[in-house]
Amino acid sequence: MSGEKDLRKLLSGMRPELNPGCYVFTTVAPSAPVPPGLDPVVTVREREGLTLVVAQKDADAAGLAYDYAAGWITLRVHSALEAVGLTAAVARELAEYGLSCNVVAGFHHDHLFVPLDRAEEAVTVLTGLARRSG
């Protein structure tokens, strides 16, 4: 099933949903596997290391260092991977409110990691953008 490409439809239908919990970005050696007991929501293998986005409690239990605590927002619209403008529009809107955003595109949805202490505010901002885009 292919995803939506029309930017107006993507924005008006994004239905941002805050996932429960606190998530952190951490890293292990470049060639290392995911440490036992961890169930990352995102992995990115870079030359410098394997980035893991995991629940903070799991990172703490594994003794992994991190310095960014995030809320995880899922945009509940099925966006096409080749869609143009969704990431830019979302990032621009959040930036207007001084909110940083790390975006990860999944096959079905886009996922945003925003400062934990402002995650609910980010959902409110994105909900407003969706209403204005309809």
Image (spheres, grey):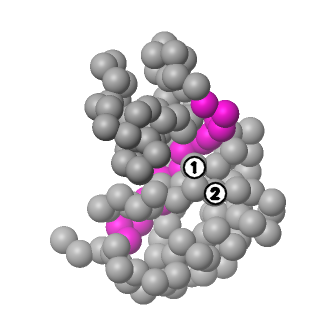
Q: Determine the residue positioned at 52% across, 81% down.
A: 85
Magenta stretch bounds: 66-79
Q: Nearer the viewer, residue 121 or 40?
A: 40
Q: Determine the residue positioned at 33% across, 18% down.
A: 37
Q: Nearer the viewer, residue 125 or 34?
A: 34
Q: Which residue is mark 2?
A: 101
In the drawing, what numbered circle is on residue 11?
none
Give the amino acid at mark 1: Phe
Which of the two discs, 1 and 2, labels the residue nearer the N terminus?
2
Q: Nearer the viewer, residue 14 or 72?
A: 72
Picture layout, residue 90 above or below residue 82: above
Picture layout, residue 39 above or below residue 120: above
Mark 1 and mark 2 residues within 8 Å of each other at the beta carbon: yes
Q: Nearer the viewer, residue 120 or 70?
A: 70
Q: Check disc 1 and report its element: helix, strand or loop.
A: strand
77 left or right of 127 in image: left
Q: Residue 133 at what x, y percent from top left?
A: 60, 81
Q: Residue 125 at what x, y percent from top left?
A: 71, 62
Q: Is residue 34 visible?
A: yes
Q: Residue 134 at what x, y percent from top left?
A: 57, 81
Q: Is residue 56 magenta?
A: no
Q: Which residue is mark 1?
A: 113
Q: Residue 60 at what x, y percent from top left?
A: 54, 17
